[in-house]
Each structure stands twice: as structure tokens, then as C-alpha cells.
Amino acid sequence: MRLIAKLIAVLAVLAIAVGTWAALEGHRRFTGPGKLAEPITIVIPKGAGLEAIARRLEANKVVPDRFSFMIGTRLRQVVLKAGEYEFPARISAEEAMRMIAEGRTVKHKLTIAEGLTVRQILAELDQADFLAGKVTKMPAEGWLLPETWVLSRDDDRAELVARMEKSMRQTLDELWAKRAADLPLKSPEEALILASVVERETGLKAERPMVAGVFINRLRLGMRLQSDPTVIYGLSEGMGVLDRPLTRADLEKPHAWNTYVIDRLPKTAIANPGRASLEAVLNPARTDALYFVADGSGGHAFAKSLDEHNRNVGTWRKVEKERKGR
């Protein structure tokens, strides 16, 4: 009996020793530097449980073994989140757990350029392969704010479009409240439409208030805007680009966006304007100019009279002819 009691005592001590060693070794493997040689990006899918996540991390050598990771995670009672994670070299299993629990996912930047149409923007969203879902409802033209969006993998495309619309409405409301007095614009919607025309007329931020000033003057006098981009929008079925130059017949063809034919703003916006174009329309430059034409340097020549404008047009045509002759 004594021998059995001694044997049990020895086994108990050994069990405690082994257990203590296992616990210390597990803690070391969980908290110590890992063996990942180079940074790696891994996607944790939605709905993945702890064991599935641990296996994926183990297979990619982010953690030394799945068991210590699972035990350490359970002891800390954290919830792991789906997403795309970039783990640095030599990361510990504990730090990998923290990254996933805190949702420190990889951030993707998607820049939507000013002046794109809704159809062009939706095409860019379709090509962003880190996004998920589909946009089933076509947004109204002009109501998506162009800017750089910081996103995570599997963010929903339709939700992003909703964010763009909300940002545009907030921006437009903010700027409308600060508009200049006596503008010939009845509503924020009209300001948006005119801003889209300004956006497509010039790519120079510094020039937009002047271009806006010309259009505001024309609206005040009841003159037609006579903007080529409005004609292009109508002819291109909302794409905003043509694969050929405009013709006189194009300028004379009646449609709801042709400002050579209609005596008002286009039916809708012709693109999605940026903040600078909205600001330009709501606080335009004070000018007597009623005309402008490209000057060959990327900007425009402005004129108060038709005679002066015709001279500027002649100069521009010479520039075009010289370029074609090279």
C-alpha cells in the first residue's frame, strides 16, 4: 500500500510538472516571436469558427500551432472578426489574435475621379475586385461625391454608393447655405447640374470659378449655355464620351441635355462634380465674360464680346492646325 501511495504521489508530481511545463511552453509559443519569415496577407472568411481560423493561420505559418492559438484565444475570451489581414514577419500568435479581434483589416483606397458619370463610376466599382455585392439600383446622375474612399475587403458596393450619395447631399447642403446672393439658381439641384457642366468644361481647379461666372452671367441674361459636354452626354447615353469630334448636326440635334438648343439648364447633371466645382458655382468669379474657348495651354481664353470670342476661336483653330501638322 505504501509503495502504491508513493507511486501515486510521484505520478502526481510528474503530472503537475508536465502540466506546468506544457502551460509554460504553450504560453511561450503563444506570446513569443513567431517564425513567419515574410509578411503575408490572409483573408478570414465570414462565419469561420475559431478552429477554422487557427488551421488557416497554422497552414500559413502565422502561428506555430493551432492548439496554443485556440487555447490562448479562449482564455482571453475574445471574438475573432472576418476580414483581410496583413501579418508582419515574426508576429506572435497573441498579436495575431489581437489584430483579428480588433478588426485591424487591410485598407484599400479607391479614388473616384471628379467628372465621371454614374455609369463610369459603377464600372469602376465593378472592377474593384476587393468589393462585394452588386448595385441593383441606378443612382441619379450627379449625386455621387467623387473622392478617395478607404475600404475593407468585402465592403458592399451598394452600401458604398449609398455613402457616396449621402456625402454629396451633405456637401451640397453645406455649400448651398453659404452661396452668394442673387444667383439665378432656384435649388441645390440646379446648382448640382450647373456644377457638373463646369466640371466637364475645365480640369483646372483655379479656372472653375471663372467658367462658373460665365455660365451664371448667361443664365442671368437668358442666354443659352452652349456647352459641348452637355451635347456629348445626351449623344453618348450617359457615358459622357464620344469616339469622334462633335459635328454641327450634333449641336443642332434636340435632346434634353443639348444646351445649344434648350434655353435652360440640362435635364439632369451630366457628371458627378467634385467639391471645387460646387463651390465655384455657388460662389462664382465676378466677371463680365460671356464666352470662353480653349487656349491651347490646357486652359481657356475668356471674352466679353462675341467679336473678341471669335478672335480667340480663330487663335485656337490655328493652334489645332499646327498640332495636326506636326
Image (cartoon, rainbow, N blue to C red):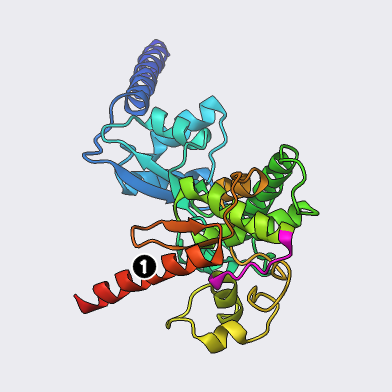
Residue range highlighted in magenta: 221-228
In magenta stretch: residue 226: yes
Residue appearing at x 31%, y 24% in the figure: 32
Residue 26 vertical placement versus 115 (above, below): above
Residue appearing at x 72%, y 71% in the figure: 267
- The residue that mark 1 highlights is 315
Query: Picture coordinates of residue 320 (x, y %)?
Result: 32, 73
Of the pair 54 and 286, the residue shown nearer to us: 286
Under mark 1, the amino acid is Thr
Determine if residue 238 is in view.
no
Residue farthest toward the front in the current orientation of the protein: 307
Residue appearing at x 57%, y 58% in the figure: 198
Relative to 107, 121 lies left or right? right
Residue farthest toward the right in the current orientation of the protein: 186
Residue 51 vertical placement versus 74 (above, below): below
In magenta stretch: residue 232: no
Query: Picture coordinates of residue 318 (x, y %)?
Result: 32, 72
Relative to 210, 10 lies left or right? left
Main secondary structure type of the part rendered in magenta: loop
Q: For the C terminus, give its image quadrant.
A: bottom left
Of the pair 215 and 137, the residue shown nearer to us: 215
Relative to 177, 226 lies left or right? left
Residue 171 vertical placement versus 246 (above, below): above
Query: Picture coordinates of residue 311 (x, y %)?
Result: 43, 67
Residue 102 vertical placement versus 59 (above, below): above
Residue appearing at x 52%, y 32% in the figure: 102
